[in-house]
Amino acid sequence: RKSLAFTSKTPGKTQQFNYFAVNDKPDLERQIRFGDEVPGTKDLDAFYIVDLPGFGFAKVPQKQRQQWSDFMDEYLQYRATLRVVFHLIDARHGPTEEDGKIMQRVGRLLGNQQNRA
């Protein structure tokens, strides 16, 4: 489907968090956001893929970048059903310093979450 999510050949164009429901509520045709209450029962094999902006490439003001970072921290800390995090790296450029910082933060946040469980 072409309208599933905006894509661009230019890095840094994604400027929102995109949520994709997999195996759940095929008739649900609206975008679901973190914290939304979705009526009905959840399918046992359902999960969400959440696509975040590329922090290292996005051409946005520092204030916007900080808002994304704060939201990501909150999502990682309080999303009790979170099972896996994939951090995609552009193979043409290799990992950047920003990638390293993000992975350290993800590791710290998820490590703290495990200690609370």
Image (tube, helix red, strand yellow):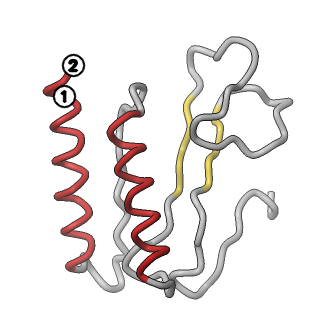
Label 1, residues with CA under 10 Å away: few <14, some 14-19, many ≥20: few
Q: Which residue is drawn at 23% across and 40% down?
A: 110
Quadrant of the drawing holding the N terminus: bottom right
Label 1 element class: helix
Q: Do the residues labelled 1 and 2 touch (CB within 8 Å)?
A: yes
23 above or below 59?
Answer: above
- Residue 87's spot in the image, x, y percent? 34, 58
32 above or below 86?
Answer: above
Q: Mark 2 points at which residue?
A: 117
Question: Dividing the picture into quarters, in which one does residue 6 lie?
Answer: bottom right
Q: Name the residue under label 1.
A: 114
Kind of residue at badge 2: Ala
Kind of residue at badge 1: Gln
Q: Which residue is drawn at 27% across and 79% down?
A: 94
Quadrant of the drawing holding the C terminus: top left
Distance in Å between CA atoms under marks 1 and 2: 5 Å
Q: In this view, does 85 lie to the left or right of 3?
A: left
The number of numbered discs placed on residues in the rendered structure image is 2
